[in-house]
Image: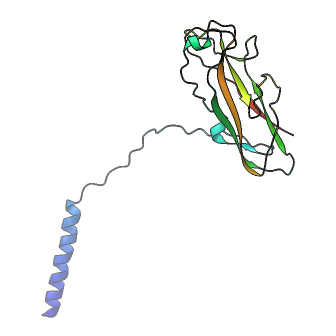
Amino acid sequence: MNKKILLSSLAILASFGVASAAFAADPVTPLTVIGGTVNFQGEITAGACAVDKDSVDQTVQMGQVKAVTLKDAGAVSSSHHFNIKLDDCSTDTYNNVAMSFSGATDGNGSLALTDAAGSAKNVGIDIYDGAHKKVTFGGTSTTPVEFHDGTNVIPFSANYVSTNGGATAGTANATTTFNVVYS
């Protein structure tokens, strides 16, 4: 009799398994859709340091300056500080670092504003290195700075300058590129 009860119990349990499988949701067919593109950019360098990824393409927010502040030739806005950060530096080969900046300049040697509809006129941008020396664009290096092993932060500042007086209102954007010079 125990065999009959055992077999009956097993049969009942097996039927529950079949019944629950019958009530389970139909299997879902996987769906793949186009997601996007991932681009990787970088460079392997032989330099004494690596330029930090946040310093490679940065934007310095110059804010708003009233045109009347720059009405006289040579007038300047307040300074805005920015840094170029160098990572993983080694003094095995070099001990000093400087930057050389390039970009379109005006007749006074200031970085020229991007010439576009609605741009401010008679205004440029001057950049100063950590020694407060005005950057000369076009390949001349800034004041060399002694660096140390590890991470180094090289300070700079920028301000708008009235190149000829009579600054006009408008967008005041400019672009410069830099190279790292080791010595």
Image quarter in which the N terminus is found: bottom left
Given residues 177 and 71, the one toward you in this image is: 71
Residue 138 drawn above or below residue 86: above
Q: Quadrant of residue 117?
A: top right
Q: Which residue of the protein is positioned furthest toward the bottom in this rendering?
A: 1
Q: Which residue lies at the image location 78% right of the left edge and 28% below the top edge? A: 133
Identify the residue at image location x=83%, y=42%.
Answer: 96
Residue 122: % across, % down = 65, 9
Most foreground residue, 46 or 18: 46
For this orientation, the residue located farthest to the top is 166
Q: Is residue 91 above or below residue 108?
A: below
Residue at 80% over, 50% down: 90
Q: Quadrant of residue 13?
A: bottom left
| Number of numbered discs on residues | 0
Residue at (73, 15) in percent of width and height: 105
Q: Percent from the top left, x then y, of residue 16?
A: 18, 71
Residue 39 placed where, x, y %? 59, 38
* Image quadrant in which you'd find residue 32: top left
Judge from the rendering whether residue 70 lies leftward or rightward of residue 31; answer left or right. Answer: right
Q: Where does the C terminus fall, quadrant-wise?
A: top right
Relative to 83, does residue 14 appear above or below in the rendering?
below
Snapshot colouring:
rainbow
**Residue 52 in the image: x percent, y percent?**
67, 42
